[in-house]
Image: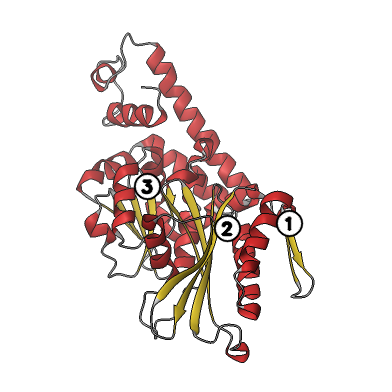
Amino acid sequence: MALLVAGILELDSNGDVLLTASHPKVEPDELEVLKSHSGLLSPKETPLVPLVCSRYSNRWHYIVTVDADRDTRTSLPFVDRFSVFVVTKDFCPEKYFELCQILSKAHNKTGDSVNLMRVFVDVTIKQKYENKTLGLKFEESAFDARRSLLASPLKGLVDLFADDFSVLWLAMALKRRIFVLSSNAAEALRVVRAMPLLVWHRSSWGILRPYVTATDAEIKDLQQIGIFCAGVVGDDSPVPRRVPHDVFVNVPERRVTVTETGNDLRVFAELKIVQDITAAVRHTAAGETDQVVIKTLATKTKELLDKINTIKRSLDSFSIESLKSLDPPLPPHWPQFAFSLAVAEGIA
């Protein structure tokens, strides 16, 4: 089990958000992020965000937020809302949301944070937990991590962004900085978690930040990792204004915009090789399963990389200048594209 921390945040009747349980300790910067993602710091009339998955530094965060049960006020008499969170090493939203929901049900019924430690110990050591009195049961073996990687279909990106799909593929292939604007955290997770499928061979889920708010800790984290695909919620999110990026994906408007630093993506999208690859993916997506779509794109990407490697072996040195000097010459913009992709793949 990759469970690192489990904890409870409570919004009390005075409007204060308190860390009432944590096993083991959470550092102040990470606690700042968890509080912000829980939504408990928002005005009381703000609808709660029931499920949040994101990543801070090298740790995944999963948060379930609920209203305190008004029918059992003896357990949580001064609590309006609370969040249960777990911090883990691995990406598996379905598994950890289920674990958080079990913890939240136990806390709502008993108000006893000792349950948190019991669950943490049992799940860490035995990979399962059961409380027959409360009717709660969790087994890690019921969840397949690989299914979580495939839970949001690549076909969804093809359908959503049509002609801009080529820019999305290029942005991930060339390791660019991407923001995904969504109307809510669940939609952000659905789109962001599909992006690594564009470069399946890299297993690049570590660059994901499915939900980002404007805490100083998160801004610093994005600046330090350099390459990211991060979800933001609401048109008024200040994060994209504070962090330089190359691509801005607007999910509600189904639109992809490139910034000045990402202008080359539009140029590369016009290359025949890129158009052929994305056309093949769109054609496959129209009538095949998502696994076939992923395999099609992965195969086409490998063929392109093999071609670049073949060219590289024919040269004394590998650079944009040497690629421009080939005879017969490569098509316009091909040298820049090939070199950029080789750098991203670590083969330049």
Q: Which residue is mark 3?
A: 228
| Residue behind mark 2 | 93
Quadrant that contains the C terminus = top left
Above-or-below relation of 243 to 232: above
Q: Between 335 and 78, which is closer to the camera in this rendering?
A: 78
Amino acid type, mark 1: Lys
The quarter of the picture where residue 105 lies is bottom right
> Which sits earlier in the primary sequence, circle 2 or circle 3?
2
Residue 5: percent from left, percent from top: 54, 55
**Residue 128 has which mark?**
1
- Image position of 81 with respect to 56: above or below: below
The residue lying toward the viewer, choosing from 207 and 338, is 207
Q: Is residue 158 visible?
A: no
Q: Give the side of residue 194 with respect to residue 96, left or right.
A: left
Element type at mark 1: strand
- Residue drawn at x 44%, y 69% is 38
Q: Earlier in the sequence, mark 1 or mark 3?
A: 1
Observer able to see residue 264: yes
Height in image: 34 above or below 263? below
